[in-house]
Image (spheres, rainbow, N blue to C red):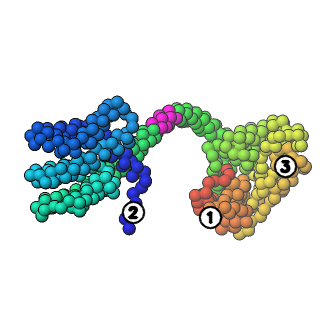
Amino acid sequence: MKPKEPEELIAKYTEYLGDSTVKTMILKLSLGLLILTYFSYTDLVVIGNVNAFYTRLLSITLGILLIIFHFLFKNRFKQIKLSVYNYFLASLALMMLAKCLVHLNDAYLASSVAGTLLIYFIISLEIKSNTKKAALIYFVPVLVFILILVKWFHLSNEQFDILSNIYPISIIGFLINRIQNRLRFGTFQSNYLLDIEKVKAGNLYNESLITNKKLNQSYEEILAQHDEIELQRNQLYQTNTHITNSINYARNIQNAMLPAEDIFLQNFSEYLILYKPSEILSGDFYWIEKNENSIIYAVADCTGHGVPGAMLSMLGISLLNKITSQNRDLTSAEILEKLRCELKKSLNQKDYSNTESKDGMDISVCKIDTDNLQLQFSGAYNSLYIYRDKELIELKADRQPIAIYIKEENFTNHIFQLQKGDILYAFTDGFVDQFDENENKYKIKRFKKFILDVADFDLHQQKQLFETEFLSWKLSQEQTDDVTVVAVKI
């Protein structure tokens, strides 16, 4: 079954037919009235048949009334005008048939039928309505009218043959009307759908213009933001460059405060210094001083790293220089006691519970008597390892820092007799606290084993092995803390 057309489309098509009919109605009415006037003149003057003229009165009257009505109500009563126009067309067909009836026994019958056929065919082309309505208005009355003629009048064979010519033209007109209507509807439907798509396209175009405008506004805002960001980036770059230059300069100062390695070279057969800050500045430091009959050196890890740690490390170096220069006979434990006292005074650390700053350092201090190779060791959290005859001896540090502490006790002064060939390892916790890529710490147990594995190599080679071990352990992981290892061979 053929699907029905949408009601909206049918309504629009009906409206379109009415508008197109009204648009050309006056011109066609004028032509029709001219033709009727000519036929009327022929009937009245040439033929002298008044009865034939009467058959045209209805059509002429309807045409004249419609022209007057149209100009009186130009943009109103469209449906009434269309109805009258339809009656006018119907009256033309019926008029011609009535004229045939007038000339039924007349010599002009054949010419009247020919005129009827011509008018009828023109009407079939002119009709602009659906097929059912056209059949009801034009074709059905004509066919019924002819059947009445045949039944009521005794026609000769010749007359019947002449009138029967109306039948084919009726059928042809009906078919032409149907074809015209389908073609006209198809064209209208295409144009209607095309107009809808044009409207959609127009809406999309307008939306795209609005979107494009918004995009342009966003682009301009982004450009403005980009310029602002670029300005801020340049300012940040300049600031960062200034800060970096300052920190690099501070690193030069910090490195200058570290002891020259020549002191280690002059006082020990071999030495190792592994010093790896996690940032530009370091919170670790090492320190050494040579007296007449003793060597004192220390390895320390200050609270924090970077700039804060570096400030504490420089303070620690200054305090150690001050303490040892004032009294050269201090034990390693007394050095730590005085260092703790001076640091607390410098950082204004008075009451542990009320002090916000508990910064300080972990440190190991070694004092070696060069005459008898006696070692004094004291440590704050940082122990000392001594390698001798394939064994590792540990001198343990006290579990308290160089800083204000909840329970401060005197530091232990370890005494140990050294031998030629002993290697002393002092270090901060940066190496053993380093994480690998699986977030595992290196830990002290592995560190001890590594020392035992490499201790028989000379300290220059050991430094390279310590470097390789550290880098192999952390791989792509960031360095956790500052790393310092100082080893000396007696």
Of residues 2 and 23, the one nearer the viewer is 23
Amino acid bearing label 1: Phe
Q: Residue at x 25, y 59 (%)?
A: 148
Q: Residue at x 24, y 50 (%)?
A: 94
Observer-side mark, 2 or 3, equals 2
Q: Position of residue 253 (x, y in %)?
A: 64, 37
Of residues 177 and 307, the one nearer the viewer is 177
Q: Which residue is mark 3?
A: 333
Amino acid bearing label 2: Pro
Q: Tag 1's secondary structure?
A: loop
The disc at residue 457 is: 1
Residue 34 location, quadrant: top left
Residue 105 location, quadrant: bottom left
Indicate yes or no whether the magenta region holds residue 213.
yes
C-alpha separation, residue under disc 1 versus residue under disc 2 = 99 Å
Q: Position of residue 321 (x, y in %)?
A: 75, 39
The disc at residue 3 is: 2
Q: Tag 2's secondary structure?
A: loop
- Please say whether residue 338 is visible from this viewpoint: no
Residue that sits furthest to the top in the current view: 72
Q: Tag 3's secondary structure?
A: helix
The disc at residue 300 is: none
Q: Which quarter of the figure is the C terminus placed in?
A: bottom right
Q: Which residues are magenta?
A: 212-226
Amino acid bearing label 3: Ala
| Side of 392 relative to 195 (left or right) | right
* Mark 1 vs 2, N-terminal side: 2
Residue 489 location, quadrant: bottom right
